[in-house]
Amino acid sequence: MGKTGDFFFYIFAAVTLLPACVVVFSRNLLYSAFSLLFTLSGVAALYALLGADFLAVTQVLVYVGGILVLILFGIMFTQKVYDLRAEAMSFKRLRAAVIGAVVFVSLVGVVRSVPWPQAARAPQPTSAGIGNLLLSEYLLPFEAISVLLLVVLVGAVLVGKKEVEE
């Protein structure tokens, strides 16, 4: 990547990991949800830095634009949840710390034992290739999924619709 790429990687990694710690350790649900915004945005920035532009845009649209807004609405429209303090019992914290340490040590062992290949060239944009594949080789599955999603949407509207008696 180079020195500039390494610098931006460390900045985006910090923007991802520090708010993730706030999400996990904060006792206020609203602070956790807003910290999740920065965590998901940092992940999108890391995707963009790696050249996965389609994944970066999908991350922003689906997770930051959809899931996070849904979580925030759920928190804000629920009465008195913003004052709720998430308390965990001490035996659950100890068990979680032990399991977390075991998983962390296992992941570090796997990362250190795998010979990671280095890319010979800079990453290329992915959106054009995905678009070409969706509109050529995978056109039939793409259209079948779109029809299925349309049927699900119409079904959800019909199930949620109130019946009007005349």
Image (tube, rainbow, N blue to C red):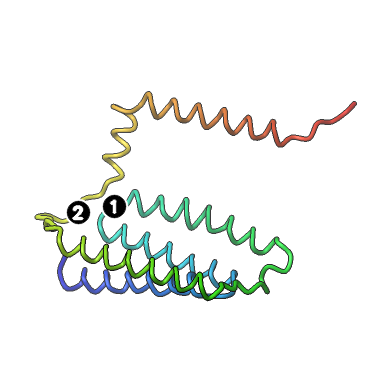
| Mark drawn on residue 125 | none
Q: Is residue 52 placed above or below 6 in the rendered structure?
A: above
Three-letter code for the amino acid on which mark 2 is drawn: Pro
Quadrant that contains the N terminus: bottom left
Q: Give percent across and percent down for residue 76.
A: 67, 64
Of marks 2 and 1, which one's residue comes earlier in the chain? 1
Q: How far apart are marks 2 and 1 (CA)?
A: 8 Å
Q: Give percent across and percent down for residue 123.
A: 19, 54
At x 81% / y 31%, what residue is drawn? 163
Q: Mark 1 points at which residue?
A: 52
Quadrant of res 70: bottom right
Q: Give percent across and percent down for residue 116.
A: 14, 58
Q: Is residue 103 left or right of residue 119?
A: right
Density class for disc 2 (Cα within 10 Å; few <14, some 14-19, many ≥20) is: few
Circle 1 sits in a helix, a strand or a loop, which is it?
loop
Check the image and name the residue furthest to the left. 120
Circle 2 sits in a helix, a strand or a loop, which is it?
loop
Quadrant of res 142: top left
Tag 2 and tag 1, C-beta contact below 8 Å: yes
At x 16% / y 56%, what residue is drawn? 122
Q: Give percent across and percent down for residue 43.
A: 37, 61
Quadrant of res 154: top right
Q: Mark 2 points at which residue?
A: 123
Three-letter code for the amino acid on which mark 1 is drawn: Ala
115 or 107: nearer the viewer: 107
Q: Is residue 157 placed above or below 27 in the rendered structure?
A: above
At x 25% / y 55%, what residue is drawn? 51
At x 21% / y 60%, what residue is drawn? 110
